[in-house]
Image: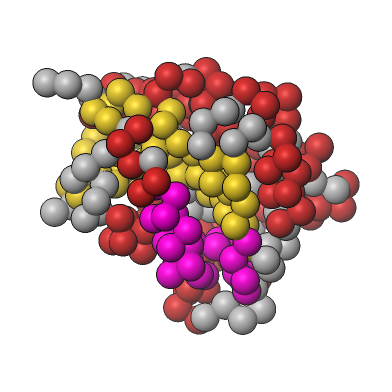
Amino acid sequence: MKALHIVDGRPRLAVEVQGSGPPVIFLHGIGGNRSNWLHQVAALSSLFTCIAWDARGYGDSDDYEGPLEFSDFGDDMARVLDHFGIARAHFVGLSMGARILMDFAPRHLERVATLTLCDCFYGFTKALSPEKQREYIELRERPLLEGKTFADLAPRLVASLVSADCPAPVRDALHQSILQLRVESYLKTLRASTTFDQADVLDRLDMPTQLIFGSEDQLTPPSIGLDMAEALPNADLAVLAGAGHLSNLEAPNAFNQVLMKFLSAHRDKAAFLPG
């Protein structure tokens, strides 16, 4: 049974829970929400307690006043763990979700059983070329500042995130996800992302780590995954053929196979607090 929980605090966070077993927490990307993990939750919930959040300012979570420090997301995640009484969790993050985990994990090493980091960069200026940095901003921030809507942005943004052969239902789901974004929260997250840099902490993340990248990812190509695999002490890289930046949506079966194999090998390293 799926259940929606509200984690108290400022801002309040919407978190969906399904299944039973050791906890696995899913973190969506900058243009998404918890529904992006539908296929993964369905595949894993017979063996794991699957927990998918809406980050602050997204989905059914509250908006917030003032600027965003990227570490605010990690502080929110610590609240989620405390709310559910989780001692250690498996964490799965895509794009922005993976960046949140690269900030959260070194500050909470004792609460991280494993990491699965998908289609992400470890530093905006260090991992992305100047051309990609400009494209990242021009596709996302500039149109909104000029008064355009997410409906205006969505077609180009979707095209930049998926492969040329992406099935129409996946494009449609992503399009709908973008339409649900909120301008101010999205802009704050964009600005915080452009200063993100965790390159110097990767060697401290010695927990088992699975990297998953789409072979057709235009934003964060598999070459970034190779760099991360070399920097992380205990990481393996899987490249999913034919998938773009949203590899869990475009290639859900292949993604789930990699994820299930990895998490099953480390299943009991995650646990709720006793009692």
Q: Is residue 182 magenta?
A: no
Quadrant of the rendered structure where residue 220 is? bottom right
Residue range (magenta):
239-263
- Who's the residue at 67% across and 26% down the image? 203
- Observer-nearest of 131 and 212: 212
Q: Is residue 113 visible?
A: yes
Question: x, y percentage for residue 199?
Answer: 73, 30
> Which quarter of the figure is the N terminus placed in?
bottom left
- Observer-nearest of 38 and 92: 92
Quadrant of the rendered structure where residue 67 is? top right
- Who's the residue at 51% across and 37% down the image? 208
Question: x, y percentage for residue 84?
Answer: 23, 29
The correct choice, above or below, for 78 with respect to 219 in the image is above
Question: x, y percentage for residue 222?
Answer: 71, 56
Main SS, magenta residues? helix
Q: Is residue 55 visible?
A: no
- Who's the residue at 43% across and 19% down the image? 110
